[in-house]
Amino acid sequence: MNRSRSRKTAKSERGSLFRFVLTVAVIAWLFRSLVFAPFSIPSGSMLPALYIGDYLVVAKWPYGLSRYSFPLQFPPIKGRVFASLPERGDVVVFVPPGRESEDYVKRLIGLPGDTVAVRDGVVILNGKPVARGQMGSTSIPVSANSPCRRIAPQGAPVTPSQGAQCVYRSYVETLPNGASYRVLDQVEGTMADNFGPVRIPAGHAFLMGDNRDDSLDSRFSEAEGGIGFVPLENIVGRATMIFWSTDGSSSYLKPWTWFTALRGGRIGDGLSPNSK
């Protein structure tokens, strides 16, 4: 009798543990799918707003949900539910067309029906030049994961010694809706400085990196290594805040280096267009 009761108790405890683990997993999946998800920055295409080694909070709800909102793109729903258009100037995380297993981050410049061109580095939106005021120079600290990648006319990168500052020419760009942010314009007269005009098709967006001479974005076709027009359905969410940032000098096997490599001053930085 006691043995039977013990077996029932053990079975009940295992069942309770399984239900608890399943509940936690479902809640975590729902939170990551519907509310927030993390994203890390692997390249310098969004300098100076985003450094390599920044970790972002991506809000899922502002634009509605598509299959790209969910881990492993499951369930494979069609289109977008509770859809809402992004705003020009938003920093968005998205899945580029033809690269279903990758996530990118760029700034949204044009919406469906807009006409976009670039002339001598100046964005032309719906026939009008986007306001660009010269800011001077912007310094980016050089670190283990952030070499001083300068796009020289001949394409040769320049890498100063560790601890140096990489200085770029920068501007403040202001879109017609008032969204403003810094952009880097390293070299004049590159292929990317003159583009279009093109009209953005229905259901698509035009995205650009803030590091204008070092970003394969909507100015380049997929065949050229760019992303072309991005379907709104492919947008995962809006990047909202930096919650962690590391300079690349840490080691997983040395926990104390997680903090020595920390860029503490970047934690909590917002990514709304006027916050930078």
Image (cartoon, helix red, strand yellow):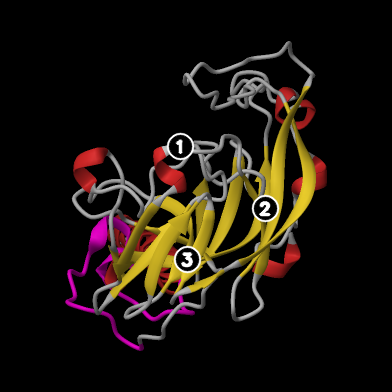
Mark closest to the chain's N terminus, 1 or 2: 1
Task: Give the residue number, with chain letter if any, for mark 2.
Answer: 243
Q: Describe residue 83's horizontal placement relative to residue 127 as left or right.
A: left
The quadrant of the rendering that contains the C terminus is bottom right
Task: Give the residue number, with chain letter if any, for mark 3.
Answer: 108
Furthest toward the bottom, the residue is: 82
> What secondary structure predominates along the stretch shown in magenta?
loop
Q: Which mark is residue 190?
A: 1
Residue at the image position 63 percent from the left and 40 percent from the top = 51
Position of residue 226 relative to residue 11, above or below, is above
For the residues labelled 1 and 2, the Cα–Cα distance comes to 35 Å
Q: Which residues are magenta?
A: 60-82
Disc 2 packing (10 Å; few <14; some 14–19; many ≥20): some
Say which of marks 1 and 2 sits in front. 1
The answer to whether residue 156 is seen in the rendering is: yes
For the residues labelled 1 and 3, the Cα–Cα distance comes to 21 Å
Dot 2 lies on which element? Answer: strand
Depth check, front residue: 191 or 46: 191
* Image spot of residue 179 (x, y percent): 64, 73
For the residues labelled 3 and 2, the Cα–Cα distance comes to 22 Å
Question: Tag 2: residue type?
Answer: Phe
Q: Is residue 69 magenta?
A: yes
Question: Tag 3: residue type?
Answer: Leu
